[in-house]
């Protein structure tokens, strides 16, 4: 750091992440056996054991006061630890270093000032739970792995999965949207919706093997046959990992988006995002990622086929015990490709028409986030783009954290509530909870009074959420 | 928020004095036969010994050489240990006040029965777990010092775990702050050799729980001083501090009960008894006229509410009595029924003023019903008789002015009813002015009406107070403070508003509209403006005592290191 600069800001970062089961090494001297995964792996063995020991002690200690609801987080000056027990006795721990400002003291030594209250528990607890859901989607439960091949298999799977996954966490960009973990739905007229449904029925019929289907347009969900929880995780994977990866390679021009028509098939824009790049290539391998759904009851293992044409994406899920052949992939490409291309342009056309009817959009005086707990529907005009590496928000981080505070206040009671606050920056923030729905509005009208703010939000509700009753 | 940081430079001065303190309880009623006369004599002997030692020390140079200081504190430790032993041996004495209150029915509402039942609770029972807020105090060696519920002995392993967590995190060059679970918050506070832990099921913020623990710490310090606590544990890591706090559990219990119901702790302000300004003025004048050298504060209290406070001029030149210190004093008086028996003379440390020095407090009730209490603070240990004379003077002038009766009629109701204001839909409020002239030199105050329907049941009262705590924590958040909160919920509508001139927290009926709430606030502010002379002490009067010159009391000869500070014998 140059002598002239006064301070340097550090965002919250992942310090360590580990998974343990206290039942695996109950004897003294065997503590290492408890540890199933530890990041960073380079950490000295005794240090790992000590850190796991602290977590065990914290959990045990809080059980003194409430046996059924043990600790969820530990706050210290320098970091925050989050605890999650997704399966009995399996503990996941995430340690996040507090954001800090490094200042130069008079003698030139850097002095770290930790900003302990800058990160929200609800957000990072949600991130940790997401880690598990994502692991489970691709690997099944911890217990199943133990049943199959003992702790060794589980360790291998954890290592393989989290080694990559942890790099994609980007903790400094996590916010209220991670708490909701919602799904953005694509608004559609009835006709087009029916067309899509009929397309899905037809494909399921023709392809035979398909157990579940999901349909997305423009990174937004239109139709899903999966259970809501499974779809939530799959949606997160598709929109924050798979799609961005492919659009990046498209932009860099590594694989051409339009394939030349192979003899006999119609020209179309369809292609596989998982599985073979080109099923007609004799060398192509038809291997698809496996996913695990309904792990609480049926425990199904499925092949995940993701197929895209223009901005329309269809996911087909087939029973993993039936190997998918090259012939199946060619058949799928031949059937789905042209139809999906057609559908994509239909949807695009419909969408443009409805936009034109609505009239030109003015830059509104407010930004909002909406979430519906019942169908996980989420809508945000605060986030312009959300990718795993970058979250572009149009408002100050502090305001976004005030939304987080209001959200935690709402979570405490089941009743309908409304909270209006005026921040020190004179922005107004309004939170409304009605039934299972939550709406947060940020108004940039610094000189407005409470009544004017109220009127403004009323107007917003009338235009955007006319069918929802919010407490007045 | 380092304790008394602004004064810390003075502390060394007082620390250097190995003064010891004794408490004297004067029984003017000759007919009162004291069954514990024998013990009192024994204790007086002890006290005299201490006095001798004290006087030896105080004749020494201002700066005591290090070795000597060590030697004297060594002696103190061993002395106190022996005192403890004799006390422990005497079964009659253990934890009971020396002064026996003759009128049992007037004893403190927090009677011994209630306290002991908490102490004997089964710490493995569900009912123990279900307490809304536990508070533990332990030493760095993990030794239990205090537990709000349950016997410390039975909780020693739990407290051991707490200490282990603290030191484990510490070993990584880090500090443990808190643990969150779905319905509990555990907050840790380390101050010197003491570790304080709050385990709460309330919705209070970590900062609020933290400040409550600080209150508990200050209350302990007010009995022992910070320097002496530090010294004790420097000498002997696993010292059992309970020996020195015997009987004071009641004070801490009472403090914690108050914190959970009295908004003055939440707002860091003092609520005074609403009085006509003329009456308050005449009472102030009475206090103002009865002074003696080294008298620094004269405080009149009625039913635990501040009536008036008069300060020595030079003392408040550069400082004021912190609301925290005043709360500790009020709590001490409230929690100790022993004070009702006669005149009490006791050393007391005001931690925010100076955590290392003692004041000497004279406490006496002025009426047979023990509603009006006089508290005089002096810097002179030997001043009991001259201070007692002040009280006589005060008593006499109050008799001629018929003051007791005037105060009693003002005490008809604890506070005032919200219905007085005539503001529809407004159910309750708390108001803390920030624009009092010369505010920085004055006592921070608040006003709040009585809690009335629909908050009649204990449960509902607690719920209302929790709502205020929630508003307070959000509006005063350290990282994201707010100017205004308007919260519409099922059972009420809340509005909190902080400006440069005031802090206001209001509670409305749930159906109030925003427009009518704003109307109500305007009316409320107008009413407070009109009544402010009655609701607040506008200009705390001052007096000048002859011998108190520029020294002020902080450089007073407060005995800093006494271990047997008199609380042993008093409570």
Image (spheres, rainbow, N blue to C red):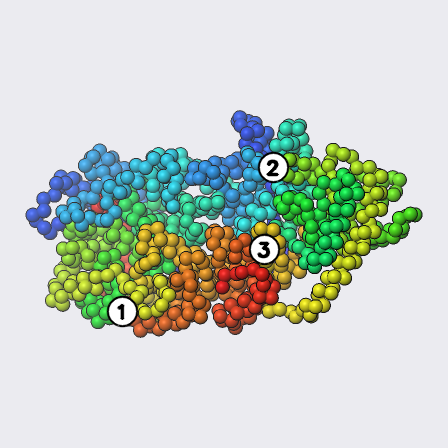
Q: How many marks?
A: 3
Q: Which quadrant does the C terminus of chain B fall into?
A: top left
| Residue beneath disc 3 | A371
Q: Which residue is mark 1?
A: B534
Q: What is the spatial separation of the Cα atoms under label 2 and label 1, in whole angstroms? A: 67 Å
Which residue occupies 24% across, 41% down? B113
- Seen at 70% across and 59% down, the residue is A189
Q: CA distance from mark 2 to mark 3?
A: 26 Å
- Of callouts 2 and 3, the N-terminal one: 2
- Considering every residue shown, the one lying at the far right of the view is A263
Check the residue under mark 3 and report the chain it is in: A
Residue A251: x %, y % from top left: 79, 55
Image position of A194 (left or right of B537): right
Front residue of this view, candidates A146 and A106: A146
Q: Estimate the x, y position of residue A450 in percent, counting from the top left.
A: 48, 69
Image position, residue B144 (x, y; %): 36, 38
**Chain that bears disc 2:** A
- Taking the spot 56% from the left edge, 28% from the top edge, the residue there is A25
Residues marked 2 and 3 touching at CB (< 8 Å): no
Q: Residue at x 32, y 58 (%)?
A: B453
Q: Is residue A121 left or right of residue B193?
A: right
């Amino acid at each position: 750091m140059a002598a002239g600069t006064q301070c340097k800001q550090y965002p919250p970062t992942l310090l360590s992440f580990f998974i343990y089961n206290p039942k695996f090494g109950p004897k003294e001297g065997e503590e290492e056996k408890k540890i199933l995964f530890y990041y960073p792996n380079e950490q000295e063995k005794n240090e790992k054991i000590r850190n796991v020991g602290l977590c065990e002690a914290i959990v045990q200690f809080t059980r003194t006061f409430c046996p059924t609801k043990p600790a969820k987080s530990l706050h210290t000056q320098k970091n925050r630890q989050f605890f999650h027990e997704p399966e009995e006795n399996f503990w996941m721990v995430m340690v996040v270093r507090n954001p800090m400002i490094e200042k130069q003291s008079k003698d030139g030594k850097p002095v770290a000032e930790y900003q302990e209250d800058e990160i929200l528990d609800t957000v990072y607890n949600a991130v940790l739970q997401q880690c598990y859901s994502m692991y489970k989607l691709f690997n099944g439960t911890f217990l199943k792995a133990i049943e199959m091949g003992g702790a060794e298999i589980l360790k291998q799977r954890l290592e393989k999965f989290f080694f990559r996954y942890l790099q994609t966490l980007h903790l400094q960009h996590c916010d209220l949207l991670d708490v909701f973990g919602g799904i953005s739905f694509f608004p559609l007229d009835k006709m087009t919706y029916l067309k899509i449904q009929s397309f899905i029925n037809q494909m399921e019929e023709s392809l035979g093997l398909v157990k579940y289907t999901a349909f997305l347009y423009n990174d937004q969900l239109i139709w899903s046959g999966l259970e809501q929880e499974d779809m939530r995780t799959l949606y997160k994977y598709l929109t924050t990992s798979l799609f961005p990866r492919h659009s990046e390679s498209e932009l860099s021009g590594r694989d051409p988006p339009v394939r030349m028509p192979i003899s006999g098939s119609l020209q179309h824009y369809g292609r596989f995002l998982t599985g073979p790049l080109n099923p007609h290539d004799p060398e192509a391998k038809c291997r698809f990622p496996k996913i695990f759904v309904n792990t609480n009851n049926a425990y199904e293992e499925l092949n995940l086929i993701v197929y895209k044409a223009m901005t329309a994406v269809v996911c087909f899920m087939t029973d993993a015990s039936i190997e998918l052949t090259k012939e199946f992939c060619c058949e799928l490409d031949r059937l789905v490709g042209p139809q999906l291309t057609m559908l994509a342009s239909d949807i695009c056309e419909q969408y443009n028409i409805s936009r034109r009817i609505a009239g030109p959009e003015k830059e509104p005086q407010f930004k909002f986030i909406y979430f519906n707990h019942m169908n996980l529907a989420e809508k945000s005009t605060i986030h312009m783009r959300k990718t795993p590496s970058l979250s572009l928000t149009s408002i100050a981080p502090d305001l976004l954290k005030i939304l987080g505070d209001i959200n935690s206040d709402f979570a405490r009671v089941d009743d309908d509530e409304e909270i209006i606050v005026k921040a020190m920056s004179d922005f107004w923030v309004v939170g409304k909870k009605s039934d299972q729905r939550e709406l947060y509005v940020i108004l940039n009208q610094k000189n407005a009074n409470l009544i004017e703010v109220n009127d403004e939000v009323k107007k917003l509700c009338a235009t955007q959420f006319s069918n929802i009753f919010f407490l007045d | 928020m380092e304790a008394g940081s602004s004064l810390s430079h003075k502390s060394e001065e007082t620390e250097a004095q190995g003064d010891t303190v004794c408490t004297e309880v004067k029984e003017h009623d000759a007919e009162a036969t004291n069954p514990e006369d024998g013990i009192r004599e024994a204790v007086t002997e002890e006290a005299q010994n201490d006095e001798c030692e004290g006087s030896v020390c105080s004749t020494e140079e201002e700066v005591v050489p290090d070795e000597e200081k060590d030697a004297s504190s060594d002696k103190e430790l061993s002395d106190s240990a022996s005192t403890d032993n004799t006390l422990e041996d005497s079964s009659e004495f253990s934890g009971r006040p020396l002064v026996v209150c003759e009128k049992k029915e007037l004893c403190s509402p927090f009677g011994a029965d209630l306290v002991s039942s908490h102490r004997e609770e089964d710490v493995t029972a569900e009912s123990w777990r279900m307490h809304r807020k536990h508070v533990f105090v332990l030493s760095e060696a993990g030794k239990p010092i205090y537990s709000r519920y349950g016997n410390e002995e039975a909780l020693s392993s739990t407290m051991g775990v707490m200490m282990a967590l603290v030191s484990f995190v510490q070993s990584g060059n880090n500090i443990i702050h808190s643990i969150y679970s779905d319905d509990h918050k555990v907050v840790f506070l380390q101050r010197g050799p003491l570790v304080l832990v709050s385990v709460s099921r309330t919705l209070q913020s970590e900062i609020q729980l933290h400040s409550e623990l600080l209150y508990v710490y200050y209350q302990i310090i007010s009995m022992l001083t910070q320097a002496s606590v530090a010294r004790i544990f420097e000498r002997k890591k696993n010292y059992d501090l309970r020996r020195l706090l015997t009987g004071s559990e009641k004070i801490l219990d009472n403090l914690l009960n108050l914190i959970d119901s009295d908004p003055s702790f939440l707002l860091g302000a003092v609520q005074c008894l609403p009085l006509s300004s003329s009456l308050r003025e005449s009472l102030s004048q009475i206090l103002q006229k009865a002074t003696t050298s080294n008298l620094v504060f004269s405080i009149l209290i009625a039913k635990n509410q501040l009536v008036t406070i008069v300060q020595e001029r030079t003392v408040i030149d550069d400082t004021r009595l912190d609301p925290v210190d005043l709360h500790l004093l009020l709590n001490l008086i409230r929690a100790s029924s022993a004070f009702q028996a006669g005149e009490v003379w006791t050393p007391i440390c005001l931690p925010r003023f100076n955590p290392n020095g003692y004041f000497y407090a004279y406490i006496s009730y002025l009426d047979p019903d023990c509603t009006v209490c006089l508290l005089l603070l002096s810097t002179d240990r030997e001043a009991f008789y001259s201070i007692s004379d002040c009280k006589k003077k005060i008593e006499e002038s109050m008799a001629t002015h018929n003051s007791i009766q005037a105060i009693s009629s003002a005490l008809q109701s604890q506070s005032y009813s919200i219905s007085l204001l005539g503001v529809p839909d407004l159910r309750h409020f708390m108001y803390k002015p920030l624009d009092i002239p010369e505010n920085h030199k004055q006592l921070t105050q608040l006003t709040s009406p009585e809690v009335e329907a629909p908050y009649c049941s204990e449960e509902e009262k607690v719920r209302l107070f929790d709502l205020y705590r929630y508003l307070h924590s959000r509006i005063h958040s350290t990282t994201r403070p707010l100017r205004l909160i308007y919260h519409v919920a099922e059972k009420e509508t809340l509005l909190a508003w902080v400006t440069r001139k005031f802090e206001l927290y209001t509670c409305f009926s749930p159906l109030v509209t925003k427009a009518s709430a704003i109307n109500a606030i305007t009316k409320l502010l107008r009413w407070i403006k009109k009544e402010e002379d009655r609701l607040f002490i506008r200009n705390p009067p001052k007096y000048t005592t002859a011998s108190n010159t520029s020294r002020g009391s902080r450089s007073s000869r407060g005995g800093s290191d006494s271990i047997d500070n008199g609380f042993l014998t008093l409570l």
